[in-house]
Image (cartoon, rainbow, N blue to C red):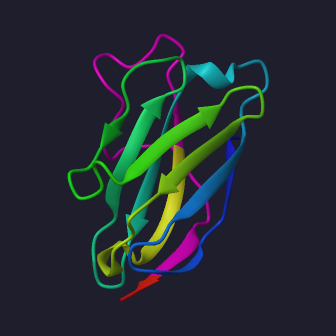
Amino acid sequence: QVQLVESGGGSAQAGGSLRLSCAVSIYRDTSFSAYCMGWFRQAPGKQREGVANIYTGGGRPYYAESVKGRFTISQDNAKNMLYLQMDNLKPEDTAMYYCAADYFPQGPQSACPLTSYNWFGQGTQVTVSS
């Protein structure tokens, strides 16, 4: 079982920054660099939205248009950690943020999935005030 635990959420003013972290426990005998990992968010009354994803074995990250240029996804393969640096926050970024993972030992066919991941964390709340 893959387990993901998010941290780093909280409150920020518009224009401020927060950094989310996700501690990842991967399947035994697999490599951290064989996973697609992503960040999702869900605001009250709205559908879950994919924010960013990355293949931990290398490649270009994906960002939703709404966060492009403001959010940065990164990883630390030595520590089995995933991060989301969020800068220039806006009130519309307010949501519960989840990290997600799926196992791709051969790498994704073209790109990491936008929505379908096998494992999600419990989430961390981000609230941005104007």
Q: Quadrant of residue 82?
A: top right
Q: Quadrant of the N terminus?
A: top right
In the picture shown, does residue 85 fall above or below 128? Answer: above
Residue 42 place in picture, x, y as percent? 38, 71
In the image, farthest residue toward the bottom? 130
Q: Residue furthest top?
A: 106
Left or right of 118? Residue 28 is right
Identify the residue shown where x is 65% and y is 51%. Answer: 22
Examine the structure image and report whether residue 107 is included in the region drawn in magenta.
yes
Residue 49 picture quarter: bottom left
Q: Is residue 25 left or right of residue 16?
A: right
Q: Of helix, strand and loop, which mostly describes the magenta segment?
A: loop
Identify which residue, 80 or 103, lies in the foreground.
80
Please state the total of marks drawn on the protein image. 0
Query: Where does residue 104 sit, x and y in percent of width and height?
Result: 50, 21
Q: Residue at x 36, y 89 (%)?
A: 130
Q: Give the answer, above or below, for where 127 lies relative to 56.
A: below
Say if 31 sits above or below 89 in the image.
Answer: above
Residue 104 lies within the magenta run: yes
Q: Please report the residue visible at 42 percent of the width from the left and 75 percent of the height from the top.
A: 95
State the residue in front, 100 or 119: 100
Question: Which of the 4 quarters of the picture holds residue 72?
Answer: top left
Q: Position of residue 84 (x, y in %)?
A: 52, 51
Give residue 90's position: percent from left, percent from top.
Answer: 33, 74
- Write down the region rendered in magenta: 101-127
Q: Who is closer to the viewer here, 19 or 46?
A: 19
Which residue is outermost to the front? Answer: 15
Whether residue 119 is visible to the viewer of this picture, yes or no, is no
Q: Is residue 42 visible?
A: yes
